[in-house]
Amino acid sequence: MTTVGLLYPGHSAEDDYPRIAVLLDSDVRLPVFHTDIGEDAHREDALIEMGAPARLAAGIEELRLAGAESLVWACTSGSFIRGWDGAQEQIRELAQTAGLPASSTSFAFVHAARALGVERVAVAATYPDDVTASFEEFLEQAGLDVTGARASGVVTAAEVGTWGREQVLDLARAGDVPRAEAVLMPDTALHTVAHLAELEAALGKPVLTANQVTVWEGLRLAERKVWAERTGVLFARPEDRIVAE
């Protein structure tokens, strides 16, 4: 049994995690520990406060007692908003406090793109323009070429959590551009796990979503490989992966 502990802000799309555990169909546990979201707003000051050390540390002891072998701060905007160096410092503090290998969803996107061998990515975001631009900058600092970005202007995670299948598919299509080798959908408040296979079929290329890459990152840190094609190309065996040219 491999246990990945997830620190998740508030309540929006955390039911994606038991759903992906079922799809993985393996001896993997994904316990979710909720952190205090503070003000629910996709705004720089609110996002920085949401990822403050004291807020994250509050859930760590319970996570350790659950037998977690790795932990991931399951929040994209609450990590990349600090910039590359600030996001690295955030996970260093998490790792030191928990005594476990740690990461965040922002770095999960970078590592997942590298694992697939893609360099050109498009962003399909629920965020306002300025927050989306901060994510683009983060990706570019990681060496990825952001070929296009779509910002939806949604201010709260609560609203994002109400989006259904059609809205998710429409966002992915709107964010895609021909040159992109993969499309990134960076919001852990967005329900995507049930639509992973359909998203990739619709776009004809890998689609990396926040809750998907968060789980993959936790397993990577725990040095555990799981193959499950229903959870997207990212979880397919390397010989079965198809990446857009």
Image (tube, rainbow, N blue to C red):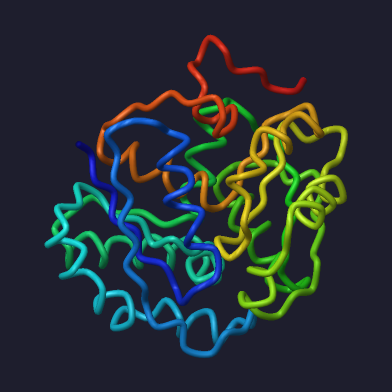
Image coordinates of residue 45 in percent, x first then y, are 56, 87
Left or right of residue 114: residue 150 = right
Left or right of residue 33: residue 142 = right
Q: Quadrant of residue 173?
A: top right
Tell me which residue sits at (82%, 58%) in the image: 150
Relative to 58, does residue 21 appear above or below in the rendering?
above
For the residue pair 4 and 27, the one nearer the viewer reads as 27
Image coordinates of residue 181 in percent, x first then y, are 73, 31
Q: Quadrant of residue 179?
A: top right
For the residue pair 149 and 3, the one nearer the viewer reads as 3
Relative to 200, does residue 245 appear above or below in the rendering?
above
As drawn, the residue found furthest toward the top would be 239
Q: What is the total number of numbered labels drawn onto the structure image?
A: 0
Tell me which residue sits at (26%, 67%) in the image: 93
Quadrant position of the N terminus in the picture: top left
Tell me which residue sits at (30%, 56%) in the image: 31
For the residue pair 48 and 28, the one nearer the viewer reads as 28
For the residue pair 238 and 139, the one nearer the viewer reads as 238
As drawn, the residue found furthest toward the bottom would be 39
Quadrant position of the C terminus in the picture: top right
Left or right of residue 84: residue 95 = left
Tell me which residue sits at (21%, 63%) in the image: 63
Q: Quadrant of residue 77?
A: bottom right
Image coordinates of residue 197 in percent, x first then y, are 66, 33
Image coordinates of residue 30 in percent, x first then y, are 33, 50
Relative to 140, does residue 90 appear above or below in the rendering?
below
